[in-house]
Amino acid sequence: MAPEQYDSSPDTSPGQLSTVPSEQFVPLSNEASPPVGQGPTALPEQSSVPAKRISRRAVIVGAAGVTTVAIVGTGAFWLIHRLLHSIPQGTLLVTYRGHSEEVRSARWSPDGRRIASASDDGTVQVWNARDGSRILTYRGHTDDVNSIAWSSDGRHIVSASSDYTAQVWDASDGRHLLTYRGHSNTVNSVRWSPDNKRIASGSDDHTVQVWNARDGNPLFIYRGHIQEVKSVSWSLDGKRVAVQSLASTTNALLNAFIAKECPPPPIIPPCASDARRTVSASRAGRTISRGWRIAGMPRGLPLTFQPPAAEGTSPPCAN
């Protein structure tokens, strides 16, 4: 059978497919390249930069560096782990669960046998430090108890509360002894002086007040802070008080003032002709004793109120 013969000349007759030899194609420039999908696209020209080879020495040095870092890191971790575990760990001895709300303060008695704890449940509870058994509960406050302090002889406890008072009571039986009402806001901190004769109290009313631990008479009021006073502490010689207060520019402001005895207070006689002196004495709106309101007295000066005259009589007015 004779091979078929193909005519290489272009056929322009309708409906016939014409072929063009490859040598007749002319490459187009980049500017004249047809859109994608509508014609041949030139392949990107390959870079003539030869590939960089990594030497065997560089590989060995890099692997050695990584291994060294891993070894050093593991060794440091092991050393820190051993150091932390070589520190003696605390051992739980007693857990006291007598309070029903948050516990604000806890203090050891001077003899180390008892612990007093103050709580938002409004109580102070004294319990055995050895076995956690409750000894007594003091319920003299009407609001959260924020701070407590033992007298150095262990006989008395003073407690500070959000009910604006500080109260002194017997540590052996919870018997109430006195209530100090000199503050006009929450009392945050109380501390006995080393000689047990005075108590310093700090309050949200921005003051520190030093008062007689026996009868509650105010001795000194420090007004150097412009924010709430959160903590007070006596020096060992009982001559100074350190005060920690919130401040607007710093987290805490530490100040110290001399806490000395004031001169003997004046005795103010009652005067029937002056209506201001016929009502009960008060400080910051709170009645503190039976006596008379004194107007114009210097702030911070303690007052001694003379008992009222017998009914039906009136002492002469002071000039």
Image (cartoon, rainbow, N blue to C red):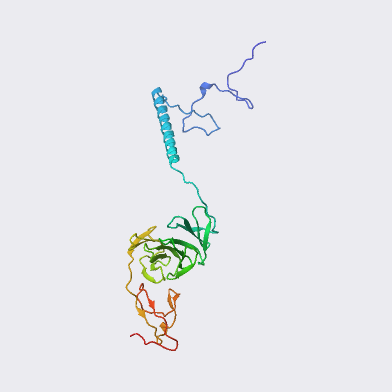
Q: Is residue 140 left or right of residue 212?
A: right
| Residue 52 visible to the viewer | no
User: Which picture quadrant has residue 265?
Assistant: bottom left
Q: Nearer the viewer, residue 25 or 45?
A: 45
Q: Nearer the viewer, residue 271 or 71?
A: 271
Q: Nearer the viewer, residue 192 or 83?
A: 192
Q: Position of residue 217 (x, y in %)?
A: 40, 72
User: Which picture quadrant has residue 6?
Assistant: top right
- Residue at left offset 38%, top offset 77%: 304
Question: In this rendering, is residue 85 above or below 57?
Answer: below
Q: How many marks?
A: 0
Toward the bottom, the furthest residue is 312
Q: Position of residue 316 (x, y in %)?
A: 37, 87
Q: Nearer the viewer, residue 43 or 240?
A: 240
Quadrant holding the N terminus:
top right
- Residue at left offset 48%, top offset 68%: 176
Q: Position of residue 95 (x, y in %)?
A: 52, 52
| Residue 67 visible to the viewer | yes
Question: In this rendering, is residue 58 above or below 154?
Answer: above
Q: Position of residue 167 (x, y in %)?
A: 46, 67
- Residue at left offset 45%, top offset 38%: 81
Q: Is residue 287 left or right of residue 267?
A: right
Toward the right, the furthest residue is 1
Quadrant holding the C terminus:
bottom left
Toward the top, the furthest residue is 1
